[in-house]
Image: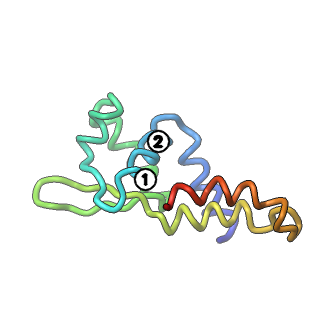
Amino acid sequence: MESEPAILALAALAQSTRLDAFRLLVRHEPDGLPAGEIADRLAVPTNTMSAHLAVLSRAGLITSQRRSRSIIYRADLDRLREVVLFLLKDCCQGRAELCQPLLAELAPCCD
């Protein structure tokens, strides 16, 4: 990943509603959530949530798919992985033992 896409993704997440929406979508993988349900769960007006979802979409952090009359949003876990790897690529100057606590924290989420 280059710097520009990483900056765009991090900037999109640097706002509390968008961060909350993204984290909510990550929790609901792989099924995703309709836009209205995201707005309801976060107590945000639908039109405001649409603007936030558009920012996350332009940053490549979420995808959308029309299902009947609803638009279902999903977190793009591949893009999340790319951003995290971009941030950690040169972690600890190649000294794996220094990164081990971070890796240990990430592993339980996937059990």
Secondary structure of the residue carrying tag 2 is: helix
Name the residue: 44% across, 63% down: 76
Question: Mark 2 is on which residue type?
Answer: Arg
Name the residue: 89% across, 67% down: 93
Q: In this figure, which colouring scheme has been used for the structure?
A: rainbow
Name the residue: 68% across, 70% down: 2
Task: Please give the label number shown on residue 26.
Answer: 1
Write down the residue under mark 2.
Answer: 18
Locate residue 32 relative to residue 17 in the image: left or right.
Answer: left
Expressed as whole percent of the image width and height from the top left, the position of residue 25 reads 38, 50
Expressed as whole percent of the image width and height from the top left, the position of residue 87 reads 71, 60
Please tell me whether mark 1 or mark 2 is closer to you in this view: 1
The residue positioned farthest toward the left in the image shown: 68
Locate residue 103 relative to residue 52 in the image: left or right.
Answer: right
**Image quadrant occupied by the N terminus:** bottom right
Name the residue: 84% across, 64% down: 97
Question: Mark 1 is on which residue type?
Answer: Val
